Image: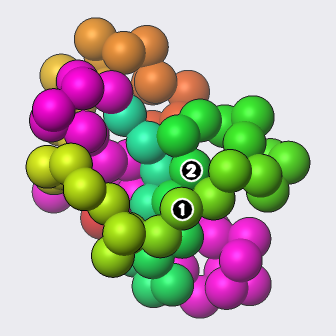
Amino acid sequence: MSFWYKPCPVCDGQGRLEIMKNIDENTLFFCCDECMSCWKNREDLEKRINKFMEYSIKFNFIPATEEDIRKHKWQKYKLNIK
């Protein structure tokens, strides 16, 4: 099970912004399951700045669990379940 925030603004809603966990830094980020665009936080996402691509990630990551989302206080972004 994975959790997602909203449709991706880059690929015009073709993909979903999944909530992912950076295992190495214990942080959460958004990543599109279609075009692989990623952002570290909502502010960057909304402004469409500091985007990075999933294939360029040099850290270990997994889909965030419900517990991860709760611990990082990202519940407001857990709007959908995949």
Badge 2, how many Cα within 10 Å: few under 14, some, many 20+?
A: many
Q: Nearer the viewer, mark 2 or mark 1?
A: 1
In the drawing, does residue 27 fall left or right of residue 42? left
Residue at horizontal 23 percent and vertical 24 percent from the top: 26
Picture quadrant where residue 70 is located: top left
Percent of width and height locating residue 75: 45, 24
Magenta residues, as a range?
A: 1-27
The N terminus - image quarter:
bottom left
Residue 1 can be seen, yes or no: yes
Picture quadrant where residue 27 is located: top left
The mark total stands at: 2
Image height check: is 64 above or below 56?
Answer: above
The C terminus - image quarter:
bottom left
Residue occupied by mark 1: 52
Residue occupied by mark 2: 39
Amino acid identity at mark 1: Phe
Percent of width and height locating residue 52: 54, 62
* Magenta run includes residue 78: no
Dot 2: element: strand
Residue at horizontal 48 percent and vertical 50 percent from the top: 30
The tag on residue 6 is none
Label 2 – label 1 distance at C-alpha:
6 Å
**Which of pointers 2 and 1 lies earlier in the amino acid sequence?**
2
Image height check: is 15 above or below 18?
Answer: below
In the drawing, does residue 73 fall left or right of residue 15? left
Residue at horizontal 53 percent and vertical 40 percent from the top: 40
Percent of width and height locating residue 47: 85, 48
